[in-house]
Every structure is written in C-alpha cells, then in structure tokens.
Image (cartoon, grey):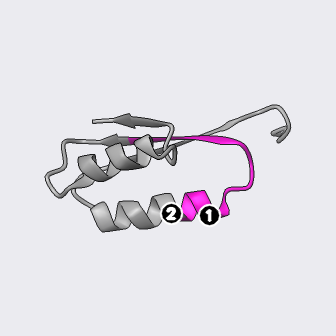
Amino acid sequence: MMDINKDTLDICVITYNRLEYLKNCVWSILASTKVKYRLTVIDDCSSDGTAEWLKQMKKNDKINTVII
C-alpha cells in the first residue's frame, strides 16, 4: 500500500498526434490527482503541435519530464 506522505506516484502518458486528447488527459491528471506524483509525457514525434505544447507545459512546471 502506498504511503502518501513518503511515496511518489509515477504517471507516464505516451502520445502520437492526439494533442486534444493529450490536453484533456493532462489537465484531468493535474486537476484530480491528490497524491504526490511525477508526470512524464512521451511524444513519438507528433506533427500536430504536441511537442510545442509539451515544452510550454514543462516550462510552466505542469509536467515533470517530457521526452520527444
């Protein structure tokens, strides 16, 4: 069982050309995850603006790690 005072939940989201779905997913995680967590998003070279959005979210400290 997770001790919410000590442990950190790792959340990993993988995406490819699904920017609107990714935005919904990330905003949902940010709004509803109540335990300490690290959010990592992996983008498989999307061509729909995903990389730019992820870089901005990382810059604003909304996402811990971005891998493109």
Total marks in image: 2
Residue at 13 percent of width and 52 percent of height: 47
User: The disc labelled 2 sits on which kind of residue?
Assistant: Trp
- Residues at circles 2 and 1 in contact by the CB criterion of under 8 Å: yes
Residue at 19 percent of width and 49 percent of height: 46
Residue at the farthest front position: 60
- Segment tinted magenta in the rendering: 28-41
Say if the magenta span includes residue 34. Answer: yes
Say if the magenta span includes residue 6. Answer: no
Please name whichever residue, 14 or 54, is drawn nearer the observer in this view of the structure. Answer: 54
Q: Residues within 10 Å of mark 2 (few under 14, many from 20)?
A: few
Residue 57 appears left or right of 61: left
Residue 29 appears left or right of 60: right
Image location (x, y in percent) of residue 15: 32, 50
Q: Disc 1 designates what residue?
A: 31
Q: Disc 2 designates what residue?
A: 27
User: The disc labelled 1 sits on which kind of residue?
Assistant: Ala
Q: CA distance from mark 2 to mark 1?
A: 6 Å
Q: In terms of secondary structure, where does tag 2 sit?
A: helix
| Quadrant (top left, top right, bottom left, bottom right) of the N terminus | top right
Image location (x, y in percent) of residue 3: 85, 38
